[in-house]
Image: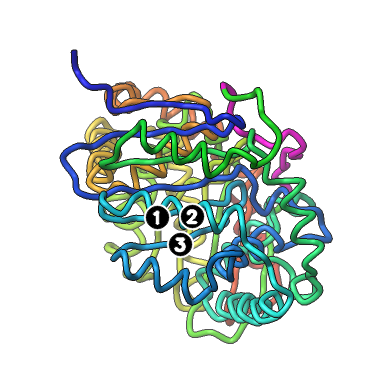
Amino acid sequence: MPVRPFHKDVLDNGIRVVMEEIPSVKSASVGIWVAVGSRDEAETEAGLAHFVEHMFFKGTIRRSAREIAQEMDGLGGELNAFTSRETTAFYANVIDEHLSRAVDLLADLFRHSVFRPVEIEREKRVVLEEIKMVEDDPEDLIYDLHTANVWSGNPIGRPILGDVKIIRSITRRQILDFLNRKYRPERMVISVAGRFNRSALIKQLNRLFRTFGPRSRRSDRPAFVETRRPPVANGRLFIRPKKLEQAHLCLGFPGLPLTHRDRYGIYALNLLLGGGMSSRLFQEIREKRGLVYSIYSHHAGFQDAGMLTVYAASSPKAVRQVVQLTIRELRKLRERGVQREELLRAVNQMKGGILLSLESTNSRMSRLARDEIYFGRYFSLEETLREINRVSRRQVQRLSDRLFDTRKLSLTVLGPVASNARPFEALLAGS
């Protein structure tokens, strides 16, 4: 009987554990994922989800912050975390013989962090410096501005790093209250990929998490937060003058939720538009005309919404032309459709990206967790490739007809440009 590489278990308190065994490697990746992100904050908590993620590394009952860092370095591994708009994840990558110690360390951070007031005050300065870094990086900054422009009035439109005034006022009581309300077993997934002993790992996880939270009965459903309010795309034009060498722009449309049945179709559409060196935007605006160094598109999918965005940076004198040419390529896609050869390239790009990601246990671990959080199930490689191969020219055409509606077009511009919106409004009106 062949060995099943994928397993799903439920711990005694209801936390789901998804695992993929890869006997051919000598490493393992483990992550603790929580379906809570910046969009789950109240307005008075803006930035708290990300700040809490930082604080988990600042000392536990058993280990100081320095001892945490030294222990992981001594294992020759990597320990890290991130916060997105919908998830927070804590993960470790180690050689397989050190997986048990890495799991113990992660569980200690997650269960026994002490959140000392002196560490909270110190970390406030760190996060405020991180916010300044974004302000100094125009490519990061414009995405925050664009998201706020498109989804203003909804928590998903706020910057993940939060508001400076709120960060300065965070207290230990706020942190503990946030964790008690948001970090629940039904919103958690532990994901493991690589070489490991399944039975020993489940025993260890049950022991480490036995007393965490009330038992959850919802082990067969996606780990969504029910109180999320779906965002409505209502942005159109936002200009922020800033002294820079280039003008940066984001031009976008409402996309599809991450779980939408046409998700592979929109991935293909994105690749055709600006997802690589052979894409239409790269060839037309960079290679043919030399107006930019960087231009690309990407689709961001969330639980109940999505956004397809084109990013470019050009000289201030060329920014209007770049916008005009981008809109023209969008119109061509909508009116003339997709060629068979370019769709085949996009399909091969998708398959190649997935197959190459299989070389990384961290990528596999992340994929397992996201599948469980958003779908409540596992997608095999064979099933995923079948879905990609089903993408058709008709599907891509239907999506471009639906999505590239210029009445829903949003444009954000950052850089040494006048705040006068009329020239850009004229471009959008003529689109």
Q: Which mark is residue 102?
A: 1
**Residue 12 visible to the viewer:** yes
Q: Residue at x 49, y 24 (%)?
A: 261
Q: Percent from the top left, x then y, of residue 137?
A: 52, 77
Mark 3 Cα within 10 Å, few/some/many (few <14, many 20+)? some
Q: Which mark is residue 150?
A: none
Read off the residue under disc 2. Answer: 106
Amino acid type, label 1: Ala
Q: Percent from the top left, x then y, of residue 28?
A: 30, 48
Mark 2 Cα within 10 Å, few/some/many (few <14, many 20+)? many
Q: Residue at x 41, y 30 (%)?
A: 396
> Which quadrant holds the N terminus?
top left
Q: Residue at x 43, y 33 (%)?
A: 18
Q: Which residues are magenta?
A: 220-234
Q: Is label 3 or label 1 in front?
A: 1
Q: Percent from the top left, x then y, of residue 141?
A: 58, 70
Q: Secondary structure at mark 3?
A: strand
Relative side of 411 to 288, left or right: right
Amino acid type, label 3: Asn
